């Protein structure tokens, strides 16, 4: 694959984006998951499982909202890395973060865990916990296998920002700052989720007048 598209053409490089107008790097850095190791396999599992759970439950019939969540997360993650690269003593750590695909995947894990905090889970059959602690359990595992904690922490920050603005803040104020723009909704043909019921099925006895009509 490297002979077709090199990772050097995909990674996030602010200097190349600004000075050489390589704007595609703002998107392609979310599409590459680096080397295939244990951490890679776990993040692929997270992507498949929790993306599916969010689509089938919280975002069922709301494809545009799901896309907007990913767009918001990608924007927040990119902004954090760009701003972090300007902060003394932290710039070196942020400079090492050149792919944000794992962070975006971890964001979905965090959002799902906050929306389903009481579900009981098991980690490799070793111990059980509720879903509210899932991001911290997975963060600890990533550290144990030698992965960067920064990558998953960024996903947790982006996920918490989305959860607060989408679920907590509207309940506090009645306002929804992350309402999906109409032009994004126009891109997706979301059908309302309805439950079909046969026309002749009754859930109560027929009126007495109908009984005496025959």
Image (tube, rainbow, N blue to C red):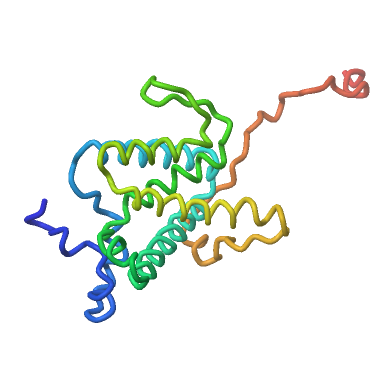
Q: Residue at x 90, y 21 (%)?
A: 213
Quarter of the rendering containing residue 58:
top right
Q: Observer-nearest residue: 25 or 208?
A: 25
x and y percent of residue 1 in the render? 11, 51
- 71 vs 162, nearest the viewer: 162
- Relative to 174, does residue 44 appear above or below in the rendering? above
- In this rendering, the answer to whether 68 lies above or below 211 is below
- In the rendered image, the residue lying farthest to the bottom is 19
Which residue does the image show at 92% across and 18% down from the upper left? 212
**Residue, x 20% and y 39% (percent of image)?**
37
Q: Is residue 32 above or below residue 183?
A: above
Total marks drawn?
0
Examine the image and state in which quarter residue 38 appears: top left
Where 94 sits versus 87, above or below?
above
Residue 147: x and y in percent read 27, 44
Left or right of 196? Residue 13 is left
The front one of 101 and 134 is 134
Q: Position of residue 169 (x, y in %)?
A: 65, 56
Foreground: 91 or 179? Answer: 91
Q: Quadrant of the C terminus?
A: top right
Identify the residue at horizontal 84%, vertical 19% (top origin): 205
x and y, in percent, of residue 22 in the image: 24, 74
In the visual, does 171 lie left or right of 193? right
């Amino acid at each position: 694959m490297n002979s077709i598209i090199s990772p050097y053409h995909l990674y996030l490089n602010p200097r190349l984006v600004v000075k050489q107008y390589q704007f595609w790097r703002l998107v392609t850095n979310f599409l590459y998951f680096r080397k295939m190791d244990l951490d890679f396999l776990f993040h692929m599992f997270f992507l498949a499982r929790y993306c599916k759970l969010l689509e089938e439950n919280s975002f069922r019939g709301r494809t545009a909202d799901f896309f907007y969540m990913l767009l918001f997360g990608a924007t927040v993650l990119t902004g954090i890395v760009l701003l972090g690269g300007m902060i003394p003593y932290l710039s070196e750590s942020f400079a090492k973060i050149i792919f944000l695909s794992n962070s975006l995947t971890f964001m979905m894990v965090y959002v799902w865990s906050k929306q389903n905090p009481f579900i009981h889970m098991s980690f490799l059959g070793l111990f059980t916990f509720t879903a509210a602690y899932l991001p911290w359990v997975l963060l600890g595992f990533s550290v144990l296998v030698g992965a960067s904690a920064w990558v998953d922490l960024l996903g947790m920050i982006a996920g918490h920002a989305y959860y607060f603005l989408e679920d907590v803040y509207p309940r506090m104020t009645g306002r929804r700052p992350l309402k999906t723009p109409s032009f994004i909704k126009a891109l997706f043909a979301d059908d309302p989720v309805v439950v079909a019921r046969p026309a002749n099925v009754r859930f109560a006895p027929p009126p007495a007048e109908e009984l005496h009509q025959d």
